[in-house]
């Protein structure tokens, strides 16, 4: 193990340079966030991920945000285990009817100020699953959404661009 | 129930029924209750393995596999009264499947041992969406969890929203101090109604939907769908398409196994492995997008072949990936092998009785870690694996450690397979035209995903649209065993056991 750790010390990091915040995301986020909220949050945002019916593809790419290539934590984001600790809800899936209440309750358990990011084509409007008896279709049908990051699934860079736009607006 | 001979031949028993024409590649028979019961007796005796159980209005289908002769077959029982003799009564692996049949189609298993709803949480605007949908007459009562009684027992409800970035499901632990006495799962939260969306879909839309039944297995699902369509329409596809499909399937296996090995170690608080394995996983995804245009390879396998050919620089990209994996992976295996504190967590944790694994026909890593050598690439097998050299690693300890080692060995096998595929990749077209069905046709496929064998059955209408399609995730026969594996372990080891299984919620809930 020591050898492995030492080697990591010499090697140049794998981490990719930060992308620019997404223009589309900035436009969607638009509105100024109030100052008090900004002061309270400082430079760090806690994210609670909620799978509201995804195929698990979006989760795989959200996981990839934490790998050495993307290293989300360098921007001050970190994933937390409870909505009570979260500033941001990152929601995936077409919101299944069976998950609707759990999503509503998770939102209610998240303290203000909070932001909701709907991830994936499913999170936007139900994606390929829209229209059936079992999906509500789009996160915004259930809770207020501040930002959409479409894609099926959005790749980690697209997720990063969106989250960086959120960070810019919040700061 | 009629007694059967000591070693009943599946096709002989099935053959008492009416063969259905236009069902390929394995036969389907419309059977009587007597034959149905004979099948249940065979299943109960362990003569055959249950592959799937699903329904449609007025009919329930039972897919069974006989090992060694390598012959799967389907029995279809007409249910004019909306009932069928319970399979789960004789063969527990069928219990959740028949509960799902009751929820979705409205066909009731007579004398079923567990008649609680499974996927239907009482929230949909209708009941029996795949049968004759009706508005729910009354609300379902609260879900009755199994009762537990005893002094000093306490319950821990977890989920559906979990602490990590994982899919939703509910786990009800009953514990005695630290030790888990019983785990009861409640699933269905991510039920998307995919089977109902598939009804009437064009092949193109259906392929996209099936490729999203479980995103981590998108290649395997798309392959199962494509193979079933090609079987139904008796279409031969070009050789190169078979080989590229296998290439994609092995890339998917590689990426997922790397991710899982890291994640299992991380759940034993050994984050270093996660960091390194996540890098390997990312390298596979980057090579995938460079070669085929999608990191997870979604929509790359289509009926008739593959959507994208390997570009000119694809071979060197993949060879570079192989070289990097071969450099970086062995030290991680060594690290795993030599870290006693990590092995202390994984060895003898989450041990499964191999007899249970056999009974459930539990596939994939979980099965192979418990001595069940089944791998659909071998049996019944499909091209190009019949022309490739590979081993199916098997262990017997059936604990978390064995599941890690099977994954390690399968990573090595996938690397060797990718190398062989690249070396011998045939040239030529990557897509062929599908034969038009012109009448009702049916097909099925059994494909080995990284998680285990995926069964897919479908019926195509004369115009080539999907009349009915049922994908069965390997998790159906794995989730119930997680309940068994955790028994007697401490609550704190649940994440470790769960990760070592890595069942799909989405694939199961459908
Ligand atoms: S957007 Fe695509 S990847 Fe994400 S959950 Fe929906 S189908 Fe899966």
Image: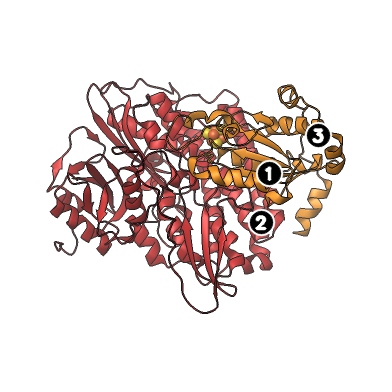
Chain colours: A orange, B red
Whether the residue under disc 1 has CB within 8 Å of ligand 1: no
Residue B141 in which image quadrant? bottom left
Q: Quadrant of ligand 1?
A: top right
Residue B201 in which image quadrant? top left
Label 1 to label 2: alpha-carbon separation: 14 Å
Packing grade of label 2 (10 A; few <14, some 14-19, many >=20) is: some
Q: Position of residue B446 (x, y in %)?
A: 36, 43
- Left or right: B230 in relation to B427: left
Disc number lying in front (1 or 2): 2
Residue at the spot of label 3 = A170
Residue at the spot of label 1 = B279
Chain for disc number 3: A
Near-viewer residue (B355 or B496): B496
Label 1 to label 3: alpha-carbon separation: 30 Å
- Left or right: A114 in relation to B240: right
Q: Are marks 1 and 2 on the same chain?
A: yes
- Left or right: B45 in relation to B471: left
Q: Are marks 2 and 3 on the same chain?
A: no
Is residue B372 in view from this perspective? yes
Secondary structure under badge 1?
Answer: helix
Secondary structure under badge 3?
Answer: helix
Quadrant containing the C terminus of chain A is top right
Chain for disc number 1: B
Q: Which mark is residue B211?
A: none
């Amino acid at each position: 193990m020591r050898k492995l750790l030492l080697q990591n010390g010499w090697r140049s990091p794998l981490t990719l340079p930060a992308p620019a915040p997404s223009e589309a995301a900035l436009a969607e986020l638009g509105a100024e966030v109030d100052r008090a909220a900004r002061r309270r949050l400082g430079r760090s945002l806690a994210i609670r991920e909620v799978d509201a019916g995804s195929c698990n593809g979006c989760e795989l790419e959200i996981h990839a945000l934490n790998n050495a290539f993307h290293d989300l934590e360098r921007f001050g984001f970190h994933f937390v285990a409870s909505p009570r600790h979260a500033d941001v809800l990152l929601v995936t899936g077409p919101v299944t009817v069976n998950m609707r209440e759990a999503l509503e309750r998770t939102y209610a358990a998240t303290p203000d100020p909070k932001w909701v990011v709907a991830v994936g084509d499913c999170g936007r409007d139900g994606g390929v699953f829209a229209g059936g008896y079992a999906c509500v279709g789009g996160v915004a049908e259930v809770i207020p959404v501040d930002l959409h990051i479409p894609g099926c699934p959005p790749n980690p860079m697209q997720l990063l661009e969106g989250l960086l736009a959120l960070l810019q607006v919040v700061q | 129930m009629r007694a059967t001979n000591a070693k009943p031949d599946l096709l002989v028993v099935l053959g008492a029924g009416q063969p259905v024409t236009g069902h390929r590649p394995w036969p389907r028979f419309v059977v009587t209750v007597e034959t149905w019961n004979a099948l249940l007796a065979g299943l109960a005796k362990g003569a055959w393995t249950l592959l799937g159980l699903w329904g449609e209005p007025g009919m329930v289908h039972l897919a069974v596999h006989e090992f060694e002769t390598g012959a799967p077959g389907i029995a279809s029982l007409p249910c004019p009264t909306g009932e069928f003799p319970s399979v789960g009564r004789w063969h527990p692996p069928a219990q959740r499947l028949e509960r799902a049949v009751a929820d979705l189609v409205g066909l009731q298993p007579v004398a079923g041992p567990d008649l609680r709803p499974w996927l239907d949480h009482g929230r949909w605007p209708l009941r029996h969406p795949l049968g004759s949908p009706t508005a729910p007459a009354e609300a379902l009562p609260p879900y009755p969890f199994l009762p537990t009684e005893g002094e000093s027992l306490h319950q821990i409800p977890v989920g559906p929203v979990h602490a990590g970035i994982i899919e939703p499901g509910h786990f009800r632990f009953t514990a005695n101090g630290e030790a888990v006495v019983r785990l009861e799962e409640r699933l269905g939260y991510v039920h998307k109604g995919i089977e109902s969306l598939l009804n009437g879909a064009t092949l193109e839309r259906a392929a996209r939907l099936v490729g999203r039944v479980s995103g981590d297995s998108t290649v395997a699902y798309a392959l199962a769908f494509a193979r079933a369509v090609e079987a139904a329409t008796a279409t031969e596809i070009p050789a190169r398409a078979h080989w590229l499909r296998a290439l994609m399937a092995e890339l998917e296996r590689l990426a997922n196994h790397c991710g899982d090995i890291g994640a299992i170690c991380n759940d034993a608080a050994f984050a270093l492995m996660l960091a390194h394995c996540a890098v390997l996983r990312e390298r596979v995804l980057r090579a995938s997008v460079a070669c085929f245009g999608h990191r997870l390879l979604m929509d790359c396998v289509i009926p008739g072949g593959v959507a994208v050919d390997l570009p000119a620089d694809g071979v060197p990209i993949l060879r570079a990936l192989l070289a990097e994996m071969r450099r970086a992976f062995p030290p991680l295996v060594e690290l795993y092998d030599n870290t006693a504190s990590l092995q202390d967590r994984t060895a003898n944790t989450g041990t499964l009785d191999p007899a249970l694994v056999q009974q459930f026909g539990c596939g994939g890593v979980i099965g192979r870690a418990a001595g069940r050598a089944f791998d659909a690439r071998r049996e019944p097998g499909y091209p190009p694996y019949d022309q490739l050299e590979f081993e199916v690693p098997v262990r017997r300890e059936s604990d978390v450690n064995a599941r890690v080692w099977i994954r390690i060995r399968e990573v090595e096998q996938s690397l060797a397979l990718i190398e062989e595929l690249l070396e011998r990749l045939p040239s030529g077209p990557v897509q062929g035209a599908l034969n038009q069905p012109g009448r009702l046709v049916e097909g099925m496929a059994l494909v080995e995903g990284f998680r285990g064998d995926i069964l897919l059955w479908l019926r195509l209408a004369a115009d080539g649209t999907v009349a009915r399609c049922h994908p069965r995730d390997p998790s159906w026969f794995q989730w119930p065993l997680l309940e068994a594996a955790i028994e007697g372990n401490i609550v704190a080891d649940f994440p470790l056991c769960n990760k070592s299984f890595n069942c799909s919620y989405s694939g199961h809930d459908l």
